[in-house]
Amino acid sequence: MEEQKGFTLVFTGNGKGKTTAALGTALRCLGYDYPVCMIQFMKGDWHYGELEAAKRLAPAFELYQMGKGFYHIEGDKYTEKEHQQAAENALLFAFEKMKSEKYRLIILDEVLVAVKFNLLKEESLLNFIHSKPKAVHLVLTGRGASKTVIDYADLVTEMREIKHPYQQGIKSIKGIDY
Protein backbone atom coordinates (compact mmCIF):
# COMPACT_ATOMS: atom_id res chain seq x y z
CA MET A 1 0.00 0.00 0.00
CA GLU A 2 1.29 3.47 -0.84
CA GLU A 3 2.56 5.52 2.06
CA GLN A 4 0.58 8.62 1.14
CA LYS A 5 -1.25 10.12 4.13
CA GLY A 6 -4.77 8.83 4.44
CA PHE A 7 -7.44 11.41 5.13
CA THR A 8 -10.39 11.44 7.48
CA LEU A 9 -13.49 12.70 5.66
CA VAL A 10 -16.76 13.61 7.37
CA PHE A 11 -20.09 13.84 5.54
CA THR A 12 -22.68 15.28 7.92
CA GLY A 13 -25.74 17.52 8.07
CA ASN A 14 -29.51 17.22 7.79
CA GLY A 15 -29.60 16.99 4.01
CA LYS A 16 -29.64 13.90 1.84
CA GLY A 17 -26.45 12.58 0.31
CA LYS A 18 -24.08 11.55 3.09
CA THR A 19 -24.04 7.84 2.30
CA THR A 20 -24.17 8.67 -1.42
CA ALA A 21 -21.03 10.82 -1.08
CA ALA A 22 -19.30 7.99 0.78
CA LEU A 23 -20.26 5.55 -1.98
CA GLY A 24 -18.93 7.97 -4.60
CA THR A 25 -15.62 8.08 -2.74
CA ALA A 26 -15.65 4.29 -2.69
CA LEU A 27 -16.14 4.17 -6.46
CA ARG A 28 -13.14 6.44 -6.95
CA CYS A 29 -10.95 4.22 -4.80
CA LEU A 30 -12.19 1.09 -6.56
CA GLY A 31 -11.31 2.73 -9.88
CA TYR A 32 -7.67 2.65 -8.76
CA ASP A 33 -7.95 -0.95 -7.49
CA TYR A 34 -7.93 0.21 -3.85
CA PRO A 35 -9.98 -2.19 -1.68
CA VAL A 36 -12.88 -0.65 0.26
CA CYS A 37 -14.76 -1.77 3.36
CA MET A 38 -18.06 -0.11 4.33
CA ILE A 39 -19.69 -0.80 7.68
CA GLN A 40 -23.22 0.47 8.25
CA PHE A 41 -23.97 1.33 11.88
CA MET A 42 -27.68 2.16 11.82
CA LYS A 43 -28.94 0.34 8.78
CA GLY A 44 -30.05 -3.12 9.75
CA ASP A 45 -32.30 -5.53 7.95
CA TRP A 46 -33.70 -3.01 5.47
CA HIS A 47 -32.81 -3.58 1.84
CA TYR A 48 -30.86 -0.84 0.05
CA GLY A 49 -29.68 -0.63 -3.54
CA GLU A 50 -26.07 -0.35 -2.40
CA LEU A 51 -26.29 -3.92 -1.08
CA GLU A 52 -26.86 -5.24 -4.60
CA ALA A 53 -24.19 -2.95 -6.05
CA ALA A 54 -21.71 -4.19 -3.42
CA LYS A 55 -22.25 -7.76 -4.61
CA ARG A 56 -21.32 -6.68 -8.14
CA LEU A 57 -18.20 -4.88 -6.92
CA ALA A 58 -17.01 -7.72 -4.68
CA PRO A 59 -14.45 -8.77 -3.67
CA ALA A 60 -12.80 -5.32 -3.88
CA PHE A 61 -15.80 -3.71 -2.14
CA GLU A 62 -17.17 -5.18 1.07
CA LEU A 63 -20.34 -3.88 2.74
CA TYR A 64 -21.56 -5.01 6.15
CA GLN A 65 -24.89 -4.07 7.73
CA MET A 66 -24.15 -4.16 11.46
CA GLY A 67 -26.93 -2.02 12.96
CA LYS A 68 -30.38 -2.95 14.16
CA GLY A 69 -32.03 -0.38 11.92
CA PHE A 70 -32.78 3.26 12.53
CA TYR A 71 -33.09 4.18 16.17
CA HIS A 72 -36.60 5.10 17.40
CA ILE A 73 -38.15 5.49 13.94
CA GLU A 74 -40.00 3.40 11.34
CA GLY A 75 -41.27 0.74 13.76
CA ASP A 76 -38.02 0.24 15.70
CA LYS A 77 -38.53 -2.95 17.72
CA TYR A 78 -35.15 -3.08 19.47
CA THR A 79 -34.17 -1.91 22.93
CA GLU A 80 -31.62 0.82 23.51
CA LYS A 81 -29.24 -1.81 24.89
CA GLU A 82 -29.57 -3.87 21.69
CA HIS A 83 -28.81 -0.79 19.58
CA GLN A 84 -25.81 0.04 21.80
CA GLN A 85 -24.46 -3.49 21.55
CA ALA A 86 -24.84 -3.46 17.76
CA ALA A 87 -22.95 -0.15 17.51
CA GLU A 88 -20.17 -1.38 19.80
CA ASN A 89 -19.90 -4.64 17.84
CA ALA A 90 -19.76 -2.69 14.56
CA LEU A 91 -16.87 -0.57 15.84
CA LEU A 92 -14.98 -3.65 17.09
CA PHE A 93 -15.52 -5.24 13.67
CA ALA A 94 -14.26 -2.03 12.02
CA PHE A 95 -11.12 -2.19 14.20
CA GLU A 96 -10.50 -5.75 12.97
CA LYS A 97 -10.95 -4.70 9.34
CA MET A 98 -8.65 -1.71 9.81
CA LYS A 99 -5.94 -3.74 11.55
CA SER A 100 -5.88 -6.15 8.61
CA GLU A 101 -4.34 -3.32 6.53
CA LYS A 102 -6.16 -4.80 3.53
CA TYR A 103 -8.23 -1.68 2.79
CA ARG A 104 -7.29 1.71 1.38
CA LEU A 105 -10.70 3.13 2.37
CA ILE A 106 -12.90 2.32 5.34
CA ILE A 107 -16.38 3.85 5.55
CA LEU A 108 -18.27 4.01 8.85
CA ASP A 109 -21.75 4.81 7.57
CA GLU A 110 -24.09 6.50 10.08
CA VAL A 111 -21.49 6.18 12.85
CA LEU A 112 -22.03 9.85 13.72
CA VAL A 113 -25.71 9.13 14.40
CA ALA A 114 -24.72 6.29 16.74
CA VAL A 115 -22.51 8.75 18.64
CA LYS A 116 -25.17 11.49 18.61
CA PHE A 117 -27.69 9.14 20.25
CA ASN A 118 -25.11 7.84 22.75
CA LEU A 119 -25.25 4.34 21.31
CA LEU A 120 -21.49 4.61 20.89
CA LYS A 121 -19.13 6.66 23.01
CA GLU A 122 -17.46 9.48 21.14
CA GLU A 123 -14.22 8.51 22.90
CA SER A 124 -14.43 5.08 21.24
CA LEU A 125 -14.84 6.65 17.80
CA LEU A 126 -11.96 9.06 18.42
CA ASN A 127 -9.79 6.13 19.50
CA PHE A 128 -10.66 4.43 16.20
CA ILE A 129 -9.75 7.56 14.22
CA HIS A 130 -6.44 7.93 16.07
CA SER A 131 -5.63 4.25 15.45
CA LYS A 132 -5.99 4.58 11.67
CA PRO A 133 -2.89 3.42 9.77
CA LYS A 134 -1.16 6.23 7.90
CA ALA A 135 -2.16 5.16 4.39
CA VAL A 136 -5.85 4.43 5.11
CA HIS A 137 -8.59 6.89 4.20
CA LEU A 138 -11.53 6.98 6.58
CA VAL A 139 -15.04 8.26 5.85
CA LEU A 140 -17.51 8.97 8.66
CA THR A 141 -21.14 9.72 7.82
CA GLY A 142 -24.23 10.78 9.70
CA ARG A 143 -26.08 13.74 11.08
CA GLY A 144 -24.74 15.65 14.03
CA ALA A 145 -20.95 15.46 13.78
CA SER A 146 -19.45 16.85 16.98
CA LYS A 147 -17.01 19.75 17.04
CA THR A 148 -14.29 17.35 18.19
CA VAL A 149 -14.78 15.06 15.18
CA ILE A 150 -15.00 18.04 12.82
CA ASP A 151 -11.80 19.53 14.25
CA TYR A 152 -9.94 16.26 13.78
CA ALA A 153 -11.14 15.57 10.23
CA ASP A 154 -9.18 16.59 7.14
CA LEU A 155 -12.31 17.26 5.08
CA VAL A 156 -15.83 18.04 6.30
CA THR A 157 -18.86 18.47 4.07
CA GLU A 158 -22.23 19.43 5.50
CA MET A 159 -25.28 18.39 3.50
CA ARG A 160 -28.02 20.99 3.94
CA GLU A 161 -31.59 20.21 3.00
CA ILE A 162 -33.14 22.89 0.83
CA LYS A 163 -35.95 20.91 -0.79
CA HIS A 164 -36.98 17.26 -0.54
CA PRO A 165 -39.93 15.35 -2.05
CA TYR A 166 -40.81 14.05 1.45
CA GLN A 167 -41.91 17.61 2.31
CA GLN A 168 -44.62 17.16 -0.35
CA GLY A 169 -45.72 13.79 1.04
CA ILE A 170 -43.73 11.70 -1.43
CA LYS A 171 -42.31 8.55 0.13
CA SER A 172 -38.76 7.28 -0.37
CA ILE A 173 -37.87 6.43 -3.95
CA LYS A 174 -36.15 3.16 -4.88
CA GLY A 175 -32.79 3.87 -6.49
CA ILE A 176 -32.67 7.43 -5.15
CA ASP A 177 -33.33 7.21 -1.42
CA TYR A 178 -32.52 3.56 -0.81
Image (spheres, helix red, strand yellow):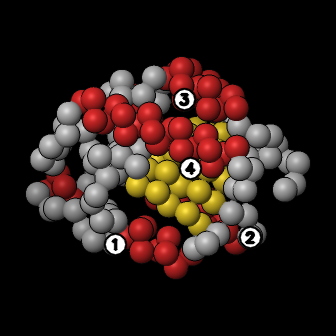
* Marks 4/1: CA–CA distance: 20 Å
Tell me where residue 8 appears, x and y as whole percent. Answer: 66, 39
* Marks 3/4: CA–CA distance: 13 Å
Residue for badge 3: 125
Q: Say left or right for 73 vs 130.
A: left
Dot 1 or dot 3: first in sequence order is: 3
Residue for badge 4: 107
Tell me where residue 49 appears, x and y as whole percent. Answer: 37, 70
Disc 2 marks which amino acid? Asp
* Marks 2/4: CA–CA distance: 16 Å
Q: Which-is-in-front pick, marks 4 and 1?
A: 4
Disc 3 marks which amino acid? Leu
* Marks 3/2: CA–CA distance: 27 Å
* Marks 1/3: CA–CA distance: 30 Å
Tell me where residue 64 appears, x and y as whole percent. Answer: 46, 57
Q: Which-is-in-front pick, marks 2 and 1?
A: 2
Seen from this angle, which residue lies furthest bottom? 56
Tell me where residue 41 appears, x and y as whole percent. Answer: 41, 44
Question: Could you tell me which residue is drawn at 57 percent across and 73 percent down?
Answer: 58
Dot 3 or dot 2: first in sequence order is: 2
Question: Could you tell me which residue is drawn at 71 percent across and 37 percent down?
Answer: 132
Residue 33: image tag: 2
Dot 3 or dot 4: first in sequence order is: 4
Question: Contact, CB < 8 Å: mark 3 with mark 2?
Answer: no
Question: Could you tell me which residue is drawn at 55 percent across and 63 percent down?
Answer: 62
Disc 1 marks which amino acid? Gly
Asked if residue 129 shows in the view, the reply is yes
Dot 2 or dot 1: first in sequence order is: 2
The N terminus, quarter of image: bottom right
Disc 4 marks which amino acid? Ile
Residue 175: image tag: 1
